[in-house]
Image: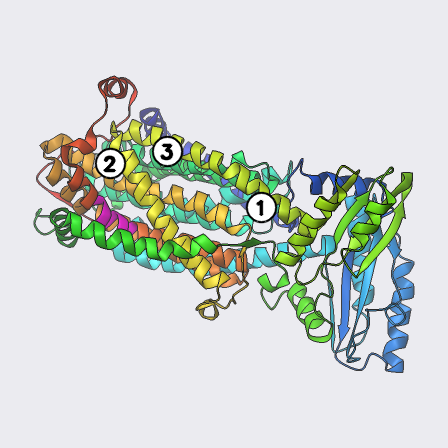
Amino acid sequence: MLSSLARAATRRPLTVICLWVVFLLLGFGLGTGVFGKLSDDVPDVPGTESDMADDYISGISPTGEEITAVVEGEAVSDAALRAQVDRAVAEVREIAGVAAVPDPYTTPGLTARDGQALIIPVTFEGGLSDDAEEDATDAAVARIKQIEAPEVHVSGGELLGRQLGERAQEDVKNAELISLPIVLALLLVVFGGLRAAAVPLVIAVSGIAGAFLALFAFSQVTDISVYAIQVTTMLGLGLAVDYALLMLVRFREERRHTEDVVEAVHRTVAAAGRTVMFSGLTVAVSLTGLLVFPSVFLRSMGLAVAAVVVIDMLAAVTLLPALLTKFGGKIKPSRVKSGDEEGRLFARIARFSARRRIAVLVTVVPALLVLALPVTGMRIAIGDAQQLPSSTEARQLYDTVDAHFPAGTGVSPVTVLLKPGTDEATADRIRGLSPNTESRDLAGGNTVLELQPPGSVDGEAAADLVERIRDVRGDEPVEVTGVAARLVDFRAMLGERAPWAALTVLAGIFVLLFAFTGSVLIPLRTIATTLLSLGAALGVVVWVFQDGHLAGLLGAEGLGALSLTAPPLIIAIAFGLAMDYELFILARMREARQLTGDDQEAVVTGLRRSGRVVTCAALLLAVVFGAFMTGGFSPILQIGLGLTLAVLIDATVVRMLLVPATMALLGRRAWWAPKPLSRLHERFGLREAAAPEQSVTTNV
């Protein structure tokens, strides 16, 4: 297949380039429509009690979404301000689609005790079409914003998703403006020429377009989280640079062996292209673990990111060869250095780790386990507006309410649906679980209770309230929903499905690594060392964002828990990225072993020839992740830091120390497999093509 792709790209390079140009236009044209379809609703799990109860209530309730406005900055009892607010409330009530707007001056709890702020909630009618709800929201916001006060903030409901989408688009644009020039500068240092440095950026832009287009496609059939756009874009950009870097390094090496550019492209695709293909497959397989979860958010993220990875992989083995066919003749071959000079530092590290393998293992492994210790106390939460940048409308509204109103104001209640036939004594016991309980009757003899939880909506007290309600109801037709109940159900879903997700990913990775190496021990060793680096990275994220250590350096604060979006995505994506560097190194080790037959020297040669590529790739990926962390969204900060640490730890400590130490410890047994599996691999396995030279190596 790779040979066919290479021949197609070299025979008709202009056709291939034009097809990718059309793809780019679609990505940056049609694909950017995803920014208007982003949702902040993450914890829904289809089929759970909280999800079904919410759907049931939505179907019979006469009211729908709600937005909240807060007016602040002067005494709200001022006659002129009160007159403005009264007029605004009266006019908003007349807007088509608005169901209710309470008087903030006469409704308890809507005027701050200090007299410096008031809240105006606007509830819309149920069953509105998307366009009707959007029109009603825009009209209500526009009218409320006309109130002349020092601060007027409006957010919530459908408006919140739109505001976050606009901010996400701005953050992605800023991240690209920051990361692409830095990446270009680093590539200039690596390759020493503008032409060679520009090629990975072209592939990177393809990755960004692929991210937009993949998300837009998925947005047509499911909700896309506001955080998905940053995650998929930064991963698409980072992996595209990684793959292009590996291919270009190999191309410059092959140019030393032949003056025929087309032949050099064919050799590059046959060798490094196979590594890229396996790398892309391992990252995609790592993300299949997210498909095990019934959560719409996790499944859509897994599919979208996997699609972006495949697009990056295809760009590396089709677009890049076409570009090299047209312009590769102007890219200089890599300089030739003797084996003693090239990669000297990495060779020394590999020999040291191989000789002192026991010392390396008893030092590095405990150190990584210590870094991973905070994971044992990890907590996840839905989070509130504190996770948003201070410049967002929703965060400003949150800060204003927090400054002027009692704790718990604006916290979503635990919603209890009492269906017909519910025993009144049971209903009374449920009402008694909270001193702040409101009741409303709905069609068909249904009653809804709203119990105000103490503390935050995702705190332990709110979760305990949900569990107590479910204990009290017994066999009665009572269902619990609301944000706190969704979080309880989401946590339960994670606990139930996580082992199956892990089994799916590990089995898939094992099969792919076996197909690549023909060994059963190397996949096991790879999985074990990768889990160490992943645990260490996740432990630091918990220590920073949950416990609050050094969080201020990142413009964040300790929140007492991680965003529920962060751990699953960090684990799935980081595991796949770790396989990238493992395959880069294993490809060179296997190649050297095929040429020399010396297992120990193959480890040293493999690191000598791949160490600089792996280090550069990790640095470039860290730059990309770091640029996306400038946006200020706490979940993105958590994911960005986790992936950055996982990549850097894996590319340095694990791949440069643990890999040679464990390979030396295993010796020839590292490449062992039972005879039936060996025969299977000989027949169906894929392997890296051998280099044409043995005596010289490449200086990237």
Left or right of residue 437, residue 268 in this image: left
At x 28%, y 18%, the residue is 680
Residue that mark 2 sits on: 261
Q: Earlier in the sequence, mark 1 or mark 2?
A: 2
Given this view, does label 3 or label 2 mark the residue nearer the observer? 3
Determine whether the residue tagged by mark 3 lies in a helix, strand or loop.
helix
At x 74%, y 72%, the residue is 405
Kindly identify which numbered label has been placed on residue 395.
Answer: none
Q: CA distance from mark 1 to mark 3?
A: 26 Å
Q: Position of residue 309 (x, y in %)?
A: 44, 39
Residue closer to the observer: 267 or 286: 286
Q: Position of residue 677 (x, y in %)?
A: 27, 20
Kindly identify which numbered label has been placed on residue 491.
Answer: 1
Q: Residues within 10 Å of mark 3 (few under 14, many from 20)?
A: many
Q: CA distance from mark 3 to mark 2?
A: 35 Å
Q: Please state, as top left, top right, bottom left or bottom right, where the N terminus lies in the image.
A: top left
Q: CA distance from mark 1 to mark 2?
A: 55 Å
Given this view, does label 1 or label 2 mark the residue nearer the observer? 1
Left or right of residue 325, residue 629 in this image: right
Magenta segment, which residues?
A: 651-659
Are the residues tagged 1 and 2 within 8 Å (C-beta)?
A: no
- Residue 202 showing in the rendered view: no
- Amino acid type for the residue under numbered disc 1: Arg
At x 27%, y 51%, the residue is 365
Residue that mark 3 sits on: 509
Indicate whether residue 267 is drawn in magenta: no
Residue 391 placement: quadrant: bottom right
- Residue 616 showing in the rendered view: yes
